[in-house]
Amino acid sequence: MLILALVPLVIAPGFLFTYDVVPKVALFLLGAAAVLPWLRLRPLAAGRAGRWFVALIALQALSLAVSTALSVRPELSLTGSTWRRFGLLTQLALLLFTLALAGYAAGNPTRIRNLLRAVACAGIPVALYGILQYFGWDPWLPKAGYHIGEGVWTIVRPPSTLGYVSYFANYLLTVMFASAALWLTEASRSWRILGAAAGLLAAAGIVLSGTRAAILGMILGGVLLALWLRPRFSPRAGLAAAAVLMLGVAFYYSPAGQSLRSRTRWYVEDPRGGSRLWLWRDSARMGLAFWPAGAGPETFTGVFPRFQSAALSRQFPDFYHESAHNIFLDAWTAQGAPGLAVLLALAALGFYAARLAPASKLAAALAAALAAALCAQQFTVFTLPTALASYLTLALLVALAVPPLETPRPRAHPALLPVSAVLALFAFRLLAADHALAATRRDIESGRLAEAQDAYQRAALLGARTDLWYSRAMQVAAQQSPDPAVAVTANRLALEFAVRATRTAEDPANAYDHLASLYGRLNDLPGTERSLRAAIAASPNWYKPHWLLAQVLWLAGRHQEARGEAVLAADLSAGRHPEVARTVRQFTRGPANE
């Protein structure tokens, strides 16, 4: 229960490089390592839903292992990308932890309620922090990171402790319906009050986040819960609902609601939700190319640009797509047809288990939580906290469908100790590497390049793949240093690690583009051209390398080729970059066609 409560909460700004990702993953891995020796599958075998659950979890683990073995980047699929660390090791730990939770709670409503209490308790500070961020209070994170726009049209997208607003809002959906379960089923007045408080704070956090997907999920889950339970609405309940509605309208039109009104304006101007429709279509095409086993977990960033259409590039030439923004498409692109089929089957099993469960109110609240999460996750992908919340919901639904059992004395299984040791070692390695990267950043910002080199070497030995970031940081240090000797050293390191980044970066197109910029500063036209052509090979419909290559070709006297690249760059940027259009005009007025 501590893991369920602490994973969404823990952040370590200043101490760690990716302060909102690594501490969560490391804490979860350590918790999973501690729990695994006590894994019990026998209670799940007592029910049909439990047996299916064990089988599907095993198939999901097998699919992930095969996809990792056949991945285009096996080392990346094994340990996970920098932005979410959701590779094979983390996902296997999640699956095993989910089995342990289901086995622990199987046939035991008291334990199920205890787990829901942990979720509600954790949700209160998470929701409160996000709400306070909306109102301008944040002692830890820079506000510029989640304030978007200018003047009266500025919107606030509070991330709370979850790293990004969508993950914050999606996590609160589980908190909201777990709290509803406590309100509906708890005998203790204190826990019912706590459930009501957590649910109201979660709902407020979702609304103030301005996340359309989570708001839609909240509505869908609420409708499902109402249809399932068919409550009788008393005049008092009607008056309370009307009062809440009036308060909401008053807040929306008050000065404090300005950010929400600005967010509504964004909705009206962007009814399609940004790039998602084009992104989903191109992600589906990517999945077809790797349908037997997928491209591998966590490889989307590097592989997708080869499948990104010119239409998507024209509509959103500057967007960076780190995922498919849909959990099923994410499974399709990463694991192929087997992974997608298993994930769909797990979702279906959750609702099947809800129908089998004898506790109708508890089952209804958990089914509503699952429906809400699935709805919202059609617009985002899993991170560890949101995946943990969704798999917890599945585990509790399955546990609820298992007949009541006698709870035997817990007994450890030594056979699982090696798995726990691997997870614990990976957790400590992640923490050490990320801490070394944080030290590297501090040393670079302070001008201590020798110390920064030592710190980064430690991070690299521990498996950090941040050569692109390190090269860019050194480039900035070279430009800002007043000491010529320091600038020379920083430039040398920037070039050295830019070359390395083309082999290690999660997004090769950006790595080659950066290397081209460094070669350009050295007036190395052949090196610049090679790097830009490699960037184009990695991301054919990205306008920027085409535009830069046009300038390199023009300087080399290859005017006809330069014009062709410039025209292509202008087409892919769709008029959103005046400097690209100026290049086309300049080249058109230049020397006659050869």
Image (cartoon, grey):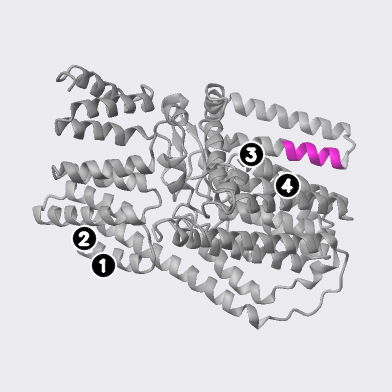
Question: Element type at marker 3?
Answer: helix
Q: Are marks 2 and 3 in contact (CB under 8 Å)?
A: no
Q: Spatial distance from mark 1 to mark 3, Cα to Cα?
A: 44 Å
Residue marked by disc 4: 369
Is 29 situated above or below 328?
Answer: below
- Quote the CA–CA distance across marks 2 and 1: 10 Å
Query: How far apart are the two marked residues, 2 and 3, measured between alpha carbons?
Result: 45 Å
Q: Which residues are magenta?
A: 220-228
Q: Which mark is drawn over residue 4?
A: none
Q: Amino acid at mark 1?
A: Asp
Q: Main secondary structure of the magenta part?
A: helix
Disc 1 and disc 3 in contact, CB within 8 angstroms = no
Name the spot of residue 498 as percent of width and height, x first.
26, 52
Q: Which residue is nearer to you in this view: 537 or 339?
A: 537
Give the answer, above or below, for where 531 lies relative to 88.
above
Please, what is the three-letter code of the amino acid marked with disc 4?
A: Ala
Task: Find the residue positioned furthest to the left.
Answer: 484
User: Quick one: label 4, few (<14), some, or many (20+) residues within 10 Å?
Assistant: many
- Camera-near label (4 vs 2) is 4
Q: Residues within 10 Å of mark 2 (few under 14, many from 20)?
A: some
Give the labeled residue for mark 1.
Answer: 454
User: Cβ–Cβ below 8 Å for labels 4 and 3?
Assistant: no
Task: Determine whether the residue tagged by mark 1 lies in a helix, strand or loop.
Answer: helix
Assess disc 3: are there few (<14), some (14-19) or many (≥20) residues with their C-alpha within 10 Å of its C-alpha: many
Residue 104's image quarter? bottom right
- Residue 448 numbered tag: 2
Name the image quarter holding residue 318: top left
In the picture of the structure, the residue carrying the numbered disc 3 is: 214
Classify the position of the N terminus by image quarter.
bottom right
